[in-house]
Image (tube, grey):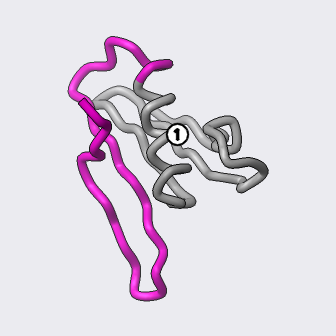
Amino acid sequence: MAFQPDILITTSDGGVMVIEAKVTMNDLPRTEEALKRYMVGMQYPFGLLITPEKGWVYRDLYSSLSPESVKQVEEFD
């Protein structure tokens, strides 16, 4: 099944943040990759992956048209 984020936040100036929320994280690399691919495909600059224990913020640097362009910029408890 294709990745669909849990929440999309849009601002009045057209900014978008993709949010993926998980109760448990069984496979962080796979979930991260899916989020990054979605961000690149939809051209959304910011992403957030969140669990009850941890959160990760991602930003697309637009250095390429691949998921490698999306970098984790913050991790928090």
Q: Quadrant of the N terminus?
A: top left
Count of marks placed on residues: 1
| Segment colored magenta | 1-30
Measuring from the top left, give residue 28's x and y in whole percent.
44, 19
Judge from the rendering whether residue 69 lies leftward or rightward of residue 33; answer left or right.
right
Please check the rendered image and state whether residue 14 is part of the magenta-colored stretch, yes or no: yes
Looking at the image, the residue that sits furthest to the right is: 63
Disc 1 residue type (three-letter):
Lys
Residue found 56% across the figure and 60% down from its top = 45
Determine the image quadrant of residue 12.
bottom left
Determine the image quadrant of residue 3.
top left
Measuring from the top left, give residue 38's x and y in whole percent.
44, 45
Q: Which residue is mark 1?
A: 36
Q: Is residue 11 above or below residue 52?
A: below
Secondary element at tag 1? helix
Measuring from the top left, give residue 65's x and y in whole percent.
67, 48
Q: Is residue 63 above or below residue 45?
A: above
Judge from the rendering whether residue 4 lies leftward or rightward of residue 43; answer left or right.
left
Q: Name the residue nearer the viewer: 68 or 51.
A: 68
Q: Name the residue nearer the viewer: 77 or 4.
A: 4
Q: Is residue 22 above or below residue 45?
A: above
Q: Is residue 60 above or below residue 21?
A: below
**Crowding at mark 1 (Cα within 10 Å: few <14, some 14-19, many 20+):** many
Residue found 70% across the figure and 43% down from its top = 69
Residue found 44% across the figure and 67% down from its top = 16
Residue found 64% across the figure and 52% down from its top = 60
Q: Name the residue nearer the viewer: 67 or 20.
A: 67
Judge from the rendering whether residue 30 lies leftward or rightward of residue 6; answer left or right.
right
Looking at the image, the residue that sits furthest to the bottom is: 12
